[in-house]
Image (spheres, grey):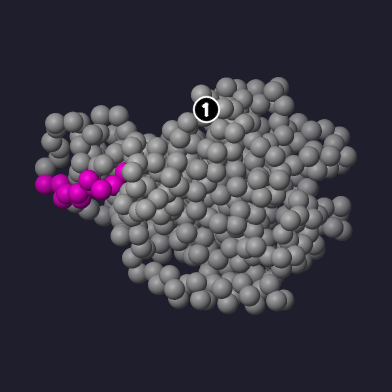
Amino acid sequence: MEQTPAIWIKDPLAILADGAERGVVVSQGKIVELVPAGGQPVTAGAAVFEARDHAVIPGLINTHHHFYQTLTRAVPAAMDRELFPWLQALYPVWARITPERLDLAVTAAMSELLLSGCTTTTDHHYVFPAGLEDAVDIEVAVAKRLGMRVLLTRGSMNRSKRDGGLPPDSVVQDEDTILADSERVVEKHHQRGEDAMVQIALAPCSPFSVTTSLMRSTAALAERLDVRLHTHLAETEDENRFCEQIHNCRPLDYLEQCGWLNARTWLAHGIFFNAEEMKRLGRAGTTISHCACSNQILASGCCPVCEMEQAGVAIGLGVDGSASNDESNLMQEVRAAFLLQRARYGVTKVSHKDALRWATKGSAACVGRPELGEIAIGKAADLALYRLDELRFSGHGDALAALVLCGAHRADRVMISGKWAVVDGAIPGLDVADLIRRHGAAAKQMQAG
Ligand SMILES: [Zn+2]
């Protein structure tokens, strides 16, 4: 690893860590010291970053997204529809993604996430029309350009209308092609170990767009390559009915039959599990990505996060695809999850700290990276710093509570693996106005057909 000088993030306005009142020292991509009240760093020669105007939290981790969907935000034909008709309206538009359009979509999504304070993101890319075979490679290149930590998934669909599935034939691939390419992208891009910046997981889209054979073979391949598994599950009542009709069982039973009910798997949504199923998830170590905005926009339902956590299931947060959210701001997602879950469980059960914990430590469990999501010695130096000098924070008491309660949405500084990825609210080297112009034009062309 390249040598970078240690940095003391000094005297923060507030910090989400015990015993770090005078800040933290980072070196070689890791947090090496927590500096207590009245203390001084013992690390010699650390550069100082004055953080007296910043509230510091662990970098947020996004556990569910579909970057390409930034090209289809607020599309009139898909608005005000529930999941299945919403998907059917959008599949033909998504069939028109090209490599250039995907590059712009991924850059837009990752930039929006970064600027909100997100340091690690997943992406679930499962649309592979002809010509877009290198989708994952394109995403890896953008992540490297922006310096973002990623767990990108090689998604898949192979059950089209022809076979009783939902998607049109133009966006699916056959099983052999999917498995061969899955192995290719893992071998080419997947890094192992605590310093990994790029990882790959395997991710059939959902039980209603993938065959049982592909579900099983993907689980076996993930086991052999030692990578994680991801899919959508228990998002809607429609899906329960589909599963009972086609497979004669509930979605979780189906998942188990396919060899997926284990600690390798994290699932998007997880709304419609019963108490017994939550216990099975907890025992298996399977984790859940809660997508509060998406679930509210599509009126899918509300993930029972408190019962899940009581059953031993780790909960992370995900913004979900920009066609159902339609933004990619993870800090706003923290607030949305806080509001939704507090409305469900009451003021004593859900605090702003719970919502921040889901987006950090909980999300770290989803991506299988216990070295992320916490400000503690030995953990990755992935941090988000927010200034509280905007009008929305004026008059605040507790600075960390204010981030959630007053609606923080833009980080001033973001550090990933000890390096600044956002400086003064901007991504160094990125011309946002130019990106918006090109991304907007690409979206317009794609939607026009
Ligand atoms: Zn999704």
Q: Is residue 337 visible?
A: yes
Query: Does the closest atom of ligand 1 sit within 8 Å of the Cβ of label 1?
Result: no
Q: Nearer the viewer, residue 23 or 253?
A: 23
Residue drawn at point x = 34 percent, y = 48 percent? 394
Q: Which of these two is toward me, 223 or 162?
A: 162
Q: Is residue 259 above or below residue 49?
A: above
Could you tell me residue 307's position as x and y percent?
61, 25
The magenta stretch spans residue 53: yes
- Residue at image position (26%, 42%) is 13
- In this rendering, is residue 349 above or below 202? above
Q: From the viewer's perspective, is 45 left or right of 326?
A: left
Give the image location of residue 188, x and y in percent: 50, 57
* Quadrant of residue 255 within the rendered picture: top right
Residue 199: x and y in percent read: 49, 50
Residue at point 39%, 41% (across, down): 402
- Residue 381 sits in quarter: top left
Q: Quadrant of the C terminus?
A: bottom right
Task: Please tell me which residue lies in front, 54 or 40.
Answer: 54
First to last magenta residue range = 45-55
Q: Quadrant of residue 273?
A: top right
Position of residue 252 in the picture relative to residue 420 (left or right): right
Label 1's element? loop
- Farthest residue to the front: give it: 395
Give how far across and how far down residue 25 sits, in percent. Answer: 22, 41
Q: Is residue 315 above or below residue 180?
A: above
Of the pair 370 and 294, the residue shown nearer to us: 294
Amino acid type, residue under disc 1 in the picture: Val
Q: Is residue 328 magenta?
A: no
Q: Which residue is pictured at 76% across the width and 51% down the height? A: 82
For label 1, the residue is 347
